Image (spheres, rainbow, N blue to C red):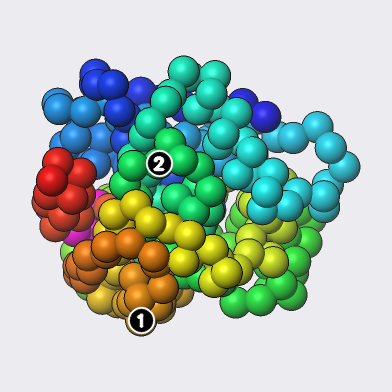
Amino acid sequence: MLLHSVSYGDGDVPVVFLGSIASTTDMWLPQLDALSGTRRVIALDHRGHGNSPDPAHTPGQTTFEDLVADVHETLDDLGVGDYDVVGLSLGGALAQHLAATDPRVRRAAFLCTATSFGGEKKWRDRAELTRTQGMTPMVDAVVGLWVSTEFSQTHPATTDFYRRMVASTRGSGYAECAEGLARFDSTPLLGEITCPVLTIAGDQDESTPPAALEQIARGVGGDSQQVVVQGGHVPTVESADAVNSALKEFLTN
C-alpha cells in the first residue's frame, strides 16, 4: 500500500527516514531541516499512522514483510532509485531489512533499534489493547520511553508535542505495526548488510539500550560506526544537534 510521504530538497540520491511506531514524519523535523539544504529528504508515515491509510485486509493479518512492502511500493511510486536509509525503532527494523535485501540502499543509519523487540506475546497483547481501547492506555508509557526524565521536566512543550503525536495515532494503525513487529528478528540478516552502517543509541534508552545497537554494529557484514547521544528512545529532538552532526558526517563521507 502507498504511504503518506513528505519530501524536501533536491538530489539524485535521497535520504529516506522511517520512524518509530506511534510516530509521524514530524518526529524527523530537525533532521529534515538540517539535511534538506544539500540532499533530497523523504519521510514516511507507517500504515495507519499520521496521514497514511489503514490497510483493507482483516485486522490481525499484518506481517513484517507487509511493512517492508509498503516502503518499497511508496519509494517506487516516488521514482526513487538508489537511496540512503535512516530508521529509528520500528523504522530501524525496516532499515535493517532494506539494507540487507534492497540493492538500492547505499548507506544505512540505525537509530535506537534492535535485532528483536521483546517477543511475540508482548506485541500481540499491545495490538489487542490498542485495537479495542485506542492509544489512551499507551500514551504515558510510550512518551516516558521516548524522552529522558530530565528532558520532560525542562522541555514540557516538546514533551506535550510527543504526547499529542502518540495520542493521535489510530489504535488500529498501532496494532497493525505491532503485529508486524511481533516476530521480527534480524539476526540472520545482519551479515547480508554490506553497505556502510551508522548506529546511534540514546544513553538513557530503556527500550533499545546502547548494547542493542552494539550488537547490530558487530553483526553487520560491512563497515560500521557507533555513536551514543544523550536521550531516551527518540533522541531526534532531545539531542537534535548531536544526531544531525552524526548523520551529516556519515551521509556526506
> Can residue 148 be seen?
no
Q: In the shown orientation, is residue 232 left or right of residue 53?
A: left
Range of the magenta residues? 237-241
Foreground mark, 1 or 2, reads 2
Q: Secondary structure at mark 2?
A: strand
Determine the CA span between mark 1 and mark 2: 25 Å
Residue occupying image coordinates x 47% and y 66%: 190
Residue 11 in percent (x, y) is at 24, 21
> Can residue 228 be seen?
yes
Residue occupying image coordinates x 38% and y 31%: 82
Contact? badges 1 and 2 (CB < 8 Å): no
**Magenta region, main secondary structure:** helix
Q: Label 2 sits on what residue type? A: Val
The circle on residue 211 is 1
Residue occupying image coordinates x 26% and y 35%: 32
Q: Secondary structure at mark 1?
A: helix
Q: In the shown orientation, is residue 153 left or right of residue 166?
A: left
Within 10 Å of disc 1 (Cα), the crowding (few <14, some 14-19, many 20+) is few
Residue 58 in percent (x, y) is at 87, 42
Please, which residue is most extreme toward the bottom here?
211
Q: Label 1 sits on what residue type? A: Ala
Q: In the shown orientation, is residue 193 left or right of residue 76?
A: left
Q: Nearer the viewer, residue 158 or 38?
A: 38
Q: Is residue 48 magenta?
A: no
Within 10 Å of disc 2 (Cα), the crowding (few <14, some 14-19, many 20+) is many
Residue occupying image coordinates x 46% and y 66%: 191
Q: Is residue 238 magenta?
A: yes
The circle on residue 105 is 2
